[in-house]
Amino acid sequence: AQSVTQLDSQVPVFEEAPVELRCNYSSSVSVYLFWYVQYPNQGLQLLLKYLSGSTLVKGINGFEAEFNKSQTSFHLRKPSVHISDTAEYFCAVTPFNTGNQFYFGTGTSLTVIP
Amino acid sequence: DAGVIQSPRHEVTEMGQEVTLRCKPISGHDYLFWYRQTMMRGLELLIYFNNNVPIDDSGMPEDRFSAKMPNASFSTLKIQPSEPRDSAVYFCASTRPGQGLTEAFFGQGTRLTVV
């Protein structure tokens, strides 16, 4: 079975400050990892994904994430946030070769303060 | 491609009425997912289809919920009768893992309010 834990439900941060949104997962099989962003009244859109290779993954809007297999983590970072980054962020996993189900965390609400 | 298309975007209905939510996946995608999003539970997978066949419906909360996929370009999620606790945002998503695509593409969602 797979599960995803997002440790912070709300993260307030000042504009131009760095931010880290934490994600840990549990799985008995290898997984692909994703971060999605949801702006108000919108669907989810992909920020970045880790499939294999380099553990540091760069995504859209200046975000990056690092896969740490030993700690089963996939934390999302941005060195300098903008007001427009205010949104809900979801971490997700999908196991290799098992029907392509996606398992989502409960989300982290990022609020960027001017 | 226009992406995953859901309709309606908003639905307000009275308790006891039947509600039908619609989804058009991205052309060529062979997996389709229905999710429900609430403040209390976050994103919950209700059911997913592969090649129009329901694979796992263990997330469907009750018999009042049903989903169909009559063809590769259309799916419905029906609630009959609806209850206030069904109020949520319902998302449809699609993907095609067999061709190396790994992420799910989401529609804009249907915001359902049952009064």
Image (spheres, grey):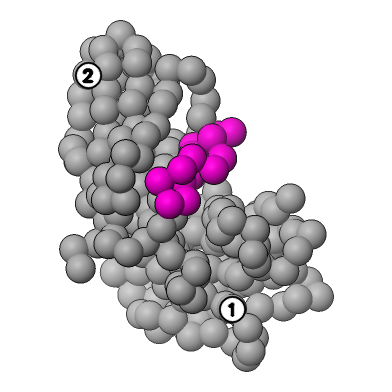
Query: Which residue shows up at 30% across the image and 8% down it?
Result: B16
Outermost residue, top side: B16
Residue A57 x %, y %: 54, 84
Describe residue A98's horizontal placement relative to residue A88 as left or right.
right
**Residue at which label 2 appears:** B13
User: Majority secondary structure of the magenta segment?
Assistant: strand
Q: Residue at x 27, y 51 (%)?
A: B73
The secondary structure type at the circle numbered 1 is loop
Q: Which x, y percent locates residue B22?
A: 25, 38
| B70 vs A48: above or below | above
Q: Chain of mark 2?
A: B
Residue B96 — which label? none
Q: Position of residue B78 (x, y in %)?
A: 33, 26
Which image quadrant for residue B1?
bottom left
Q: Which secondary structure lies at badge 2?
A: strand
Chain part drawn in magenta = B43-59
- Taking the spot 75% from the left edge, 76% from the top edge, the residue there is A69
> Is A90 drawn above or below residue B71 in the view shown?
below
Magenta run includes residue B51: yes
Quadrant where the image shows the C terminus of chain A: bottom left
Q: Which residue is mark 1?
A: A51
Task: Give the mark toward the camera: 1 or 2.
Answer: 1
